[in-house]
Image: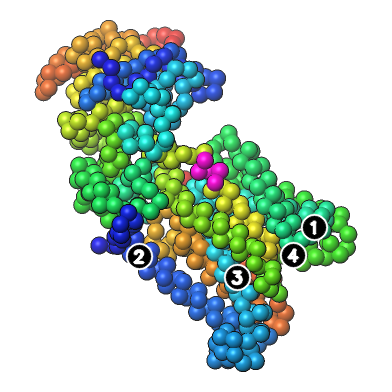
Amino acid sequence: MTGRLTAAGVTLAYGDRVVSANLTVDVPDGAFTAVVGANACGKSTLLRSFARLLAPSSGHVAFDGRDVRDYRPKAIAREVGFLPQGLVAPENIAVRQLVARGRYPHQTLLSTWSREDERAVAAAMEAAGVTDLAERPVESLSGGQRQRAWIAMVLAQETSYLLLDEPTTFLDITHQYQLLALLARLRDEGRTIIAVLHDVNQACRFADHLVAMRDGRIVAAGAPADIVDAALIKEVFDLSCVVAPDPVTGTPMIVPTEEYARSLRCRTPG
Amino acid sequence: MSALVVRAGRVSALIERRTAVTSAALAAVTLALAFVALCRGDSWDPPGEVLAGLAGHGDAALIVQEWRLPRVAGALVFGAALGTAGAIFQNVTRNALGSPDVIGMDAGAYTGVLIAITAFGGTAAGLAAGSLAGGLASAAAVYALSLRSGLSGLRLVVIGIAVNAMLTALNSWIVLRAQLEVATAATAWSAGSLNGLDWGEVRLPFLILAALALLSAVLSRTTGQAALGDDVAAASGVALNRYRLLIILAGVGLTATVTSATGPIVFVALAAPQIGRRVAGAAGTPALPAALTGALLLLAADLAAQTVVAPVQLPVGVVTTVIGGAYLCRLLIMEVRRP
């Protein structure tokens, strides 16, 4: 199993601080991959290297066998889209204007609103459910609507790969599930989704492929049903739990035991 | 629809109706005011005579075409250039205070001019080069000092204000140390003035500004993309490092060229982008409304400078400094109060 987007032996660092050393990641094509792990385990850093926002200090992140940083920026941006965290829209921008910005890598100096652009923006707004909000300023939207507007923007980029860094953060629970269902539908339509997710149960429910990370290395990778058990959760999150089948979907569902209460009382170091 | 689609062959564009209408209205108001300014000499002339003079007939032809027109054209072009430069830096810093006159580019350009005058005499090309070098050096200093905290944000603005203060002190020192004739010329210039501009003085600045305006227009779509934040911009195909270098060159070039022709004129670059984007109802801080508003602001300020305490002609920089000081205080207070 080798996907088109791969990280082979990459070392990822911010200055002198090495986050991951000699990391190799394979992402299956046409699947929904969820990256999970405790805070600061390097999952966002990995995603940023896939999105070529972080150059590995060694190793290669490659798309179709060629280093992503060797592509022209617009050419690789037509293949791999990325939605980071902490998004701030320009003041007074309407939803349709924001979504249209996703067309940037497809446009030229003279052609900034082709029929193709128009179609892609309409389709993206439809898919993300923001068509009715098209004329609304982004700052006037609720958190869930705003996140959907940004998703529409990256959808309008029409990339076969879609990377999202904790897209459900700050959404209420209903909007979290709606967003994940939207990502699953995009996967069904043929896109490859790679998302950093906080909630392991949501990751197990929606993802085909799970990458569990700790301290910058990959502890396990595979289908959630194959890899998720109490031992894995203990190793990745330091959390004792029971793994039971989700009553609705049958996917693994973690239910923590009460051991965390004991560790709180003992104040064990680490 | 609130937008118009233009398509012809391989050319296509989406034009926001409100931006188009307000831009046209701003341009019309500015041109009308420009005609009013052409009527103003030591006193007001009848519009009919001025119109005839503009067409090259009658007694007023020489006065209107050779004396007043360069000044009015200077106000329009320099104002538009300052507005564009302001929009560029406010976009790069993502802060309404991140304007070249606030963060030390004008003062740096003026330092360059002073050095050019005192050390090399003062040819037009020498002044332009000194101004550009000074502007670029101060931009590099602000950039280097704020590198750790990133290019955007209040920290860069505060560092810029500090650099501005130091450069202003340096400028005073240079003037104090200079020979009397040089010091007199330099001081008269320090206020920023359009008094007595003639075609010979504005020709070279106009050419340079046209080239830089073209560059920023070519980059305008990328500027909009960069306003989404570094990560989104890079992930959607913007070559950020190259873009930043080019746009900062354009912004510093615009500011420095105006400074070399008129001396530092504050406030226009600070206020024009913010007024322009509100009038145009535009997304973010685009350059076109900023340029049009800048032209209108500088023209109005210059007209005020000529008429408020007539027959004395104030330098336009004095007028903009008075208005700009109040505006800057308001912005700073709002910025500090922001959570």
Mark nearer the N terminus (4 vs 3): 3
The magenta stretch is B242-246
Q: Which secondary structure lies at badge 1?
A: helix
Which quarter of the picture shows residue B65?
bottom right
Task: Name which residue lies at 53% across and 48% down.
Answer: B247
Q: Nearer the viewer, mark 2 or mark 3?
A: 3
Label 4 neighbour load within 10 Å: few <14, some 14-19, many 20+: many
Label 1 neighbour load within 10 Å: few <14, some 14-19, many 20+: many
Q: Is residue A83 visible?
A: no
Mark nearer the N terminus (2 vs 3): 2
Disc 3: which residue? B75
Magenta residue check for A158: no
The quadrant the N terminus of chain B occupies is bottom left
Marks 4 and 1 share the same chain: yes
Give how far across and how far down residue B137 sits, in percent. Answer: 68, 45
Magenta residue check for B244: yes
Which quarter of the picture shows residue A47?
top left
Give how far across and how far down residue B231 sits, in percent. Answer: 42, 36
Q: Callout 1, which amino acid?
A: Ile
Q: Which secondary structure lies at badge 3?
A: helix
Distance CA(mark 1)–CA(mark 2): 46 Å
The secondary structure that dominates the magenta segment is helix
Q: Is residue A254 above or below residue B125?
A: above
Q: Is residue B86 above or below residue B34?
A: above
Give how far across and how far down residue A250 sits, in percent. Answer: 12, 18
Disc 1: which residue? B117
Disc 2: which residue? B18
Label 1 resides on the chain identified as B
Disc 4: which residue? B189
